[in-house]
Image: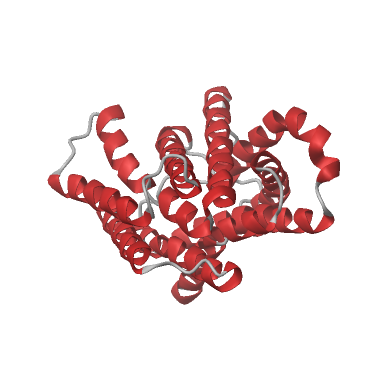
Amino acid sequence: MTERNALLAIHLGALLFGLSGIFGKLADSAPMIITFGRGLFAVVALALFAQLITRGRSANPGPRQLALLALGGLLLGAHWITFFHAVNVAGVAIATLGFASFPAFTLLLEGVLFRERIRPLELFIVGLVSLGLVLVTPSFDWGSAATQGLLSAVLSGLLFSLLSLLNRVSVKGLDPVKAALCQNLTIVLCLAPFSWPLLHEVKAMDWFWIAMLGVFCTGLAHSLFVASLKVLKARTTAVIFALEPVYGIAFAWWLFNEEPGLRMLAGGALIIFAIALSARKGAPAEGKPAAATS
């Protein structure tokens, strides 16, 4: 893969991740059903991509790694459920920007869990994200759908941050696509008993949107991310992924007429700037691949 193709791949991956909220809103189903279906289609897609990309050359996870990956699958499933709940309650724009708070959680949790010193720049990034979330929220009425949706989206960001930190220690020496495959398989196995009795209520068109989530926004997007890291600096890919909320908000504006006001645009700009700043600060040096995230 050339550098130009890698840049195209990572931009396409960011676009596909940004479309997660769009497809989740189009799939008129409960968040648990969407999460189960997304995991199911992702398992099929990732198994195929694992064969195409690694062709059996990578090591299989050991018992300890399998346990950690299963825990990661639980976090990933909870992250998806809270995110799609936020989409249903408050819309794609608020859900996407609320979830985008995860770099701030990551900076704080790294300092606590790994005993890493929190620097002034990191506190500045957390402050930017916090101010951005204040601006994004139309009002602080705890009973309003917008506030409840934002809180659910921020919880989704916290869960994703915990997943990222868990992956930091659980996927060492393991192919990232195989790691994502194990985590999605955990989601399917855990949610199957609760989702199976309700699957007959899901319409054919909703299955189509759920399949798009699993195949393109999970399997293909993750594989493009992994493939691009073999050519590009992790720093470059991390900054490009800061565009993910931009794609999500733009499509929500176009498809659902979720027109953001000036206050939301200002808050979103602060959050996206903080994401880019955090990515440039935290990206590994050239030649060192980043830990897998799902």
Left or right of residue 12, residue 185 in this image: right
Give the mark count.
0
Q: Which residue lies furthest to the right in this view?
A: 200
Q: Position of residue 199 (x, y in %)?
A: 81, 41
Left or right of residue 136, residue 38 in this image: right
Camera-nearest residue between 80 and 44: 80
Camera sees residue 204? yes
Which image quarter: residue 234?
A: bottom left
Above-or-below relation of 16 to 71? below
Above-or-below relation of 189 to 12? above
Q: Residue at x 52, y 61 (%)?
A: 18
Q: Residue at x 47, y 40 (%)?
A: 143
Camera-nearest residue between 144 and 243: 144
Q: Position of residue 294 (x, y in %)?
A: 52, 46
Which image quarter: residue 181?
A: top right
Which image quarter: residue 25?
A: bottom right
Q: Where is residue 261 in the image (x, y as percent from the top left)?
A: 39, 67
Left or right of residue 185, residue 258 in this image: left
Q: Residue furthest bottom?
A: 4
Camera sees residue 58? no
Visual colour scheme: secondary structure
Q: Which residue is drawn at 44% across and 38% down?
A: 155
Above-or-below relation of 11 to 77? below
Q: Position of residue 77 (x, y in %)?
A: 59, 37
Camera-nearest residue between 211 and 225: 211
